[in-house]
Image (cartoon, coloured by chain):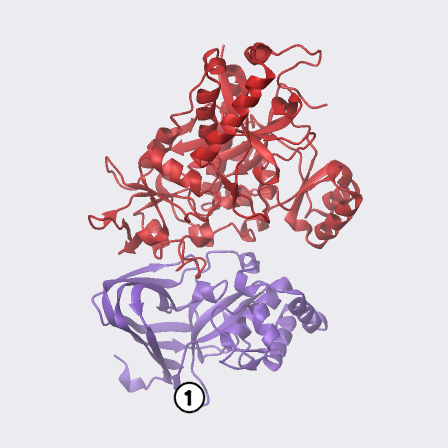
Amino acid sequence: MAFDEMHTEGGAVRSAYAGVASWLETVSADQLARRRAEAELLYRRGGITFSVYGDTQGGERIIPHDLLPRILSAAEWSRLAAGLEQRVRALNMYLTDIYGPQETLKAGIVPPDLVWRNPAFRPEMMGFKVPHGIYVHIAGIDVVRVDGDDFYVLEDNARTPSGVSYMLGGREISMRLMPDLLASHRVAPIENYPNELLAVLCSVAPRDRSEPTVVLLTPGQFNSAYYEHSYLADRMGVEPVEGRDLFVQNDVVFMRTTKGPRRVDVIYRRIDDDFLDSLVFRPDSLLGVPGLFAAYTAGNVTLANALGTGVADDKDIYSYMPEITRFLLGEEPILKNVPTWRCREPEALAYVCEHLPELVVKRVDGSGGYGMLVGPHATVAERAAFKVMLQANPERYIAQPTLALSTCPTFVESGVAPRHVDLRPFVLTGRHGVRIVPGGLTRVALRENSLVVNSSQGGGTKDTWVVER
Amino acid sequence: MRIAIQHRTQYSYDTPARSIIQMLRLTPRSHEGQTVHRWHVEVDQDADLRAGEDAFGNIMHVLSLPGPVDSLTLSLHGEVETAGADGIVRGTVERFPPRLFLRETPLTGVNPDLRAYADAVVRGATGTLDRLHALMNAIRADIAFDTSPTNVTTTAAEAFTLKRGVCQDLTHVFIACARDAGIPARYIGGHLYRSDGAILQEAGHAWAEAYVEELGWVGFDPANGVCVTDSYVRVSAGLDYLGAAPVRGTRMGGTSERMSVDVRVNQASFQSQS
């Protein structure tokens, strides 16, 4: 039985949800239906869309937004925030170590091949001191609950995590369509996220300039997250640029402007490592800026996030994070890790093959819910086919128990019903430390019994309220 | 052997390029059995040429040239003293443990056919060195030297399917097979003094180095079926061609690029010592 965030086992309403419960009693089904229709219209007008890969219909579709907020108490949040801050500090420390002294390898904490043979490891970053010692400026840490006590980290996202525009858009919808419910709670603000992000980016500029020039580098309008790129650039008041808008001269990056070239100090890049510089990485990339890597290592521009951060966030390294935290920080991990079987270990593989019906198996380098098997929901044939792939390349997979993700009340056809949720808070790290806006993006599996919250797999979003007593 | 190398690359454009940026790995380092006596890299334009090192310790220059550019000539000349003929490479800059060179790259991946081939070739051999010799000889026998069907983006698996290629392709096939057999291997760019007296060459040479536990890095030239000798001048090392390429560059604007390369590798006459 999954943990119900609104109700106790006895059916009583938990105190954090008291306001939601009494509000639900006062509104009629018709009123609710009208608000939901308005919400969809707002999203369409606002242009918040998301391309789904492999969708034969093509183009973009709207991620459904559920109007009922997910509520976290201030006490729950402060515990979670402390854990997130520690987790991201550990990620940064680990990257500093891997591209530096490699004490974690020498001490046997992490098997060396997880670094040397990891496609996300960038030999080019070895020995380079990133500006202000920060690799991961923007992290999205996916967490889930299975009971009232603990948060578990499901996945670290330390490359170019997306989704923050849905978090901000969700709050705008709440303000427009749920003003009565919002007004009856003291909800911690999140609207300052773009300002916090800009402050973090400015703080890591390579040179002492009072007003560094920051740009957001996007692959362009055909990228599935382009809406978010232009939205964030607009809210921060910085230029959204594509590779062709920038050039490098004598190891310095410039932006073409109508008033002539302008020096660029910080690049918030939403382009993958491989595509950033055709002189060093993929030679066929037209998305990046030739010479950018040389400018970066010369210390003339800061990239956020740094290159090579993927060596810290794949699902294999994930299973070592508790040990890494103890070893590098000397602290006990605050957030729990989900028990993980590493299929490259023969004993683990044997166990996983025998217990497929009860496990979730994921690709080490996968994301977006692609290439995974949810054992309990798969057919016998699907499990058999997956097992063949697993045994052919066991090193590409990890397995975890099927977690009974917590549920939140959600609008469904028949009214309001519990649906499984996760949470992606966004953690910012700058020269002056870690900043987290309270809450994050709650993703909800809209299909009954579904545990897959990815928007590409029929998931929706919810506004997340951190509520002060 | 004292080897003199002259290398000239000329670019020209019908309409001038607005700017050019290139990353050059053209300068050898000294190590045991290879002493660089003199080496010059020159550009005929007022370009910014910044020297540095890449991740693997190769000497690198970043050339940036604001336009308009209607032609560019890049020339280098130098002399290198070489010694030793046992194929073992010692005293090179090593920033990474050999196992890093088990990484698969897009150019050096194996497909099922290539994997089956590699398995069959190394099966009878005992010991790492024997397996590597078997691989080198098999690749030289089975892949014909042919400059026409491949280019710098051809992968090991593609060249293997074609059974044709240039030294770069044979080297990629060798590296892919060696790594698949669990032997660290890497790509080397450089120059070869040819015993047949062909001084004028159209390009540099490429070969591989593989790691043998008891010996260290050993150079294998699958295009010629030999381990490296004092006829080889080692310039750059990388995971594949892209990591060791002599020139990687791009330009803004400019049309109809024409490029000509002229490489001369000869024995230096001792009188010309400067």
Left or right of A83, for residue B9: left
Q: Which chain is purple?
A: B
- Type of residue at label 1? Ala
Looking at the image, residue A79 lies above or below residue B84: above
Q: Quadrant for the C terminus of chain B, please.
A: bottom left
Badge 1: chain ID = B
Location of mark 1 (residue): B198
- For the question of whether residue A90 can be seen, the reply is no
Q: Residue at x 41, y 73 (%)?
A: B34
Residue A106 spot, x, y in % from top left: 54, 45
Residue B136 spot, x, y in % from top left: 59, 76
Residue A54 spot, x, y in % from top left: 59, 49
- For the question of whether residue A178 can be seen, the reply is yes
Label 1 sits on a secondary structure element that is loop
Residue A244 spot, x, y in % from top left: 34, 54
Q: Quadrant for the N terminus of chain B, please.
A: bottom left
Instruction: In the displayed orientation, state which residue is furthest to the bottom.
Output: B196
| Number of numbered labels in the structure image | 1
Looking at the image, residue A249 lies above or below residue B112: above
Left or right of A372, for residue B19: left
Dot 1 alpha-carbon crowd within 10 angstroms: few under 14, some 14 to 19, many 20 or more: few
Q: Which chain is red?
A: A
Left or right of B253, for residue B205: right
Q: Residue at x 64, y 49 (%)?
A: A396
Q: Nearer the viewer, residue A174 or A148?
A: A174
Left or right of A432, for residue A25: right
Q: Nearer the viewer, residue B23 or B95?
A: B23
Query: Within the image, what quadrant is residue B243 found in?
Result: bottom left
Query: Within the image, what quadrant is residue A415 found in?
Result: top right
